[in-house]
Image: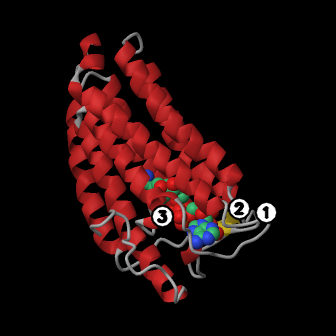
């Protein structure tokens, strides 16, 4: 099959899978973090698990950039840099800074996460570096790039700040849970997910690509149901949990 036809069918299949996963996740919460439970197979060190799970997104994108024919295009280089800023942070910095270091993660979660990251890495890398979309140098001054760029960094900042707020709720070695009160947590239970969703809306806009759109849909399909589980968990666990706080979209949901 022609590579481009394969890409198109993959994108269609991938977005259908996102819809199924989204539906399923409202009934079965992924077994990690607060929702870790027995019955999902062997467990491994959590930081190592996160690194293994997220790394394919780092390497897949680099591989496709090298194999593609856009490595001299400054716009493609900018896409790669933005992607890697996110994924180097997520794959290697975030896991090493997590509190509750003795915690473990199920291998099932790690393997499913790897599939998710490989699929999205392939989709974005092929789309951006194999001429599915064309990006002249003037793309840097295109309104779509500029608006998407701002959204990307606003989302990234909210995401990193919110992960930091959660981290600060524990002393080194602690494993318990507290109510987060700072930053965007004043508005939503999953401020880190809200930041992540805004970031990938930004990516979809700044690349104005089919892959960017599919990836944003996947991120929302994954994080909105989990945010709902987190919200329900907080409300059931803490009797003094702020009543006005939404799950993931401020003032809306
Ligand atoms: P969580 O909010 O569940 O947990 C993040 C970290 O904070 C964990 O170390 C967790 O500990 C700790 N934590 C959470 N709540 C509390 C609390 N109330 N008190 C103290 N510590 C707390 O996020 P995830 O682990 O699901 O995700 C981590 C990052 O990865 C996020 O930034 C998220 O956006 C991103 N992500 C992106 C996905 C995507 O589809 N693009 C998918 C999944 C995650 P513990 O592990 O012990 O619960």
Q: Which residue is mark 3?
A: 185
- Write down which quadrant ligand 1 falls in: bottom right
Q: Which is more N-terminal, label 1 or label 2?
A: 2
Q: Residue furthest right?
A: 173
Residue at 45%, 47% in the rendered image: 117
Confirm or reject: label 2 Cβ below 8 Å from ligand 1.
yes
Q: Which is more N-terminal, label 1 or label 3?
A: 1
Q: Which residue is mark 1?
A: 172
Nearer the observer, 202 or 162: 162
Q: Which residue is mark 2?
A: 99
Q: Check disc 1: other Cα within 10 Å, few if <14, some if 14-19, many if 20+.
A: few
Nearer the observer, 135 or 181: 181
Q: Is residue 249 left or right of residue 81?
A: left
Q: Is residue 134 left or right of residue 89?
A: left
- Name the element at disc 2: loop
Does 159 sit above or below residue 32? above
Q: Which is more N-terminal, label 2 or label 3?
A: 2
Marks 1 and 2: in contact by CB < 8 Å? Answer: yes
Residue at 43%, 38% in the rendered image: 153
Q: Quadrant of the image for the C terminus?
A: bottom left
Does 93 sit above or below residue 77? below
- Name the element at disc 3: helix
């Amino acid at each position: 099959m022609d590579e481009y036809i394969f890409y198109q069918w993959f994108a269609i299949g991938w977005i259908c899978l996102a819809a199924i996963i989204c539906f399923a996740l409202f009934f079965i919460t992924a077994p990690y973090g607060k929702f870790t439970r027995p019955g999902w197979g062997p467990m491994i060190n959590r930081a190592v698990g996160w690194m293994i799970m997220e790394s394919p997104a780092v390497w897949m994108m680099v591989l496709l950039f090298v194999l593609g024919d856009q490595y001299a295009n400054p716009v493609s280089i900018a896409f790669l840099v933005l992607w890697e800023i996110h994924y180097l942070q997520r794959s290697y910095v975030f896991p090493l800074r997590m509190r509750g270091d003795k915690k473990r993660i199920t291998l099932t979660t790690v393997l499913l996460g790897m599939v998710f990251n490989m699929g999205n890495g392939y989709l974005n890398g092929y789309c951006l570096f194999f001429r599915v979309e064309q990006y002249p140098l003037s793309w840097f001054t295109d309104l779509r790039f500029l608006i998407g760029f701002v959204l990307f960094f606003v989302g990234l900042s909210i995401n990193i700040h919110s992960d930091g707020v959660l981290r600060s709720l524990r002393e080194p070695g602690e494993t318990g849970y507290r109510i987060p009160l700072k930053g965007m947590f004043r508005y939503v239970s999953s401020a880190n997910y809200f930041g992540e969703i805004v970031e990938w809306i930004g990516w979809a806009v700044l690349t104005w690509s089919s892959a960017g759109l599919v990836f944003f849909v996947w991120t929302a399909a994954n994080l909105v149901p989990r945010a709902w589980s987190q919200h329900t968990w907080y409300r059931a666990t803490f009797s003094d949990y702020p009543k006005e706080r939404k799950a993931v979209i401020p003032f809306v949901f």
